[in-house]
Amino acid sequence: MSDVHSVNVLDRRRRAAVEFVSWSDHHAHERRRREAGLAQIETHPDALDQRNAIAQQRAWSRRQDHCRHLHDSALAQLRHR
C-alpha cells in the first residue's frame, strides 16, 4: 500500500512542478512585456514621437488592443478545452 501512496505523491509533485514551471514562464513573460511597455513610454527611441502626444496615445492604444486580444484568446482557449 505504501508503494501506491508514494507513486501518487510523486505523481502529484511532478504535476505541481510542471504547473509551477508553466506559471513561472508565463509570469516572466508578462513581466518582460510590462517592462518593455514602460520602457517604450519612458524612454522612447524616437525624440520626435516622444514629444508627440498623439503618437504616444496611438502606441498605448495598440498595446492595450493587443493585450485585450491576447486575454480574449486565452479565455477562448480555456473554454474550448
Image (spheres, rainbow, N blue to C red):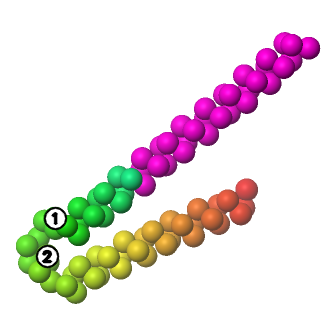
Residue placed farthest to the left in the image?
47
Q: Mark 1 vs mark 2: which is more N-terminal?
A: 1
The amino acid type found where label 2 is placed reads Gln
Residue closer to the observer: 10 or 71: 10
Left or right for 24, reference 38: right
Mark seen at residue 35: none
Which residue position is annotated with label 2? Answer: 50
Q: Quadrant of residue 55?
A: bottom left
- Secondary element type, mark 1: loop
Q: In which quarter of the image is the C terminus?
A: bottom right
The amino acid type found where label 1 is placed reads Thr
Give how far across and how far down residue 13 sits, in percent.
Answer: 68, 28
Question: Would you place residue 4 above or below residue 62 in this image?
Answer: above
- Tell me which segment is drawn in magenta: 1-30
Number of other residues with Cα within 10 Å of mark 2, as a class: few under 14, some 14 to 19, many 20 or more: some
- Secondary element type, mark 2: helix
Q: Name which residue lies at 35% across and 79% down.
A: 61
Left or right for 74, reference 12: left
Which residue position is annotated with label 1? Answer: 43
Q: Is residue 5 magenta?
A: yes
Q: Name which residue lies at 79% across and 19% down.
A: 7
Q: Name which residue lies at 66% across and 28% down.
A: 14
Give how far across and how far down residue 72 sits, in percent.
Answer: 57, 70
Give how far across and how far down residue 74 sits, in percent.
Answer: 58, 62
Q: Does the magenta stretch include residue 46?
A: no
Q: Name which residue lies at 36% across and 60% down.
A: 34
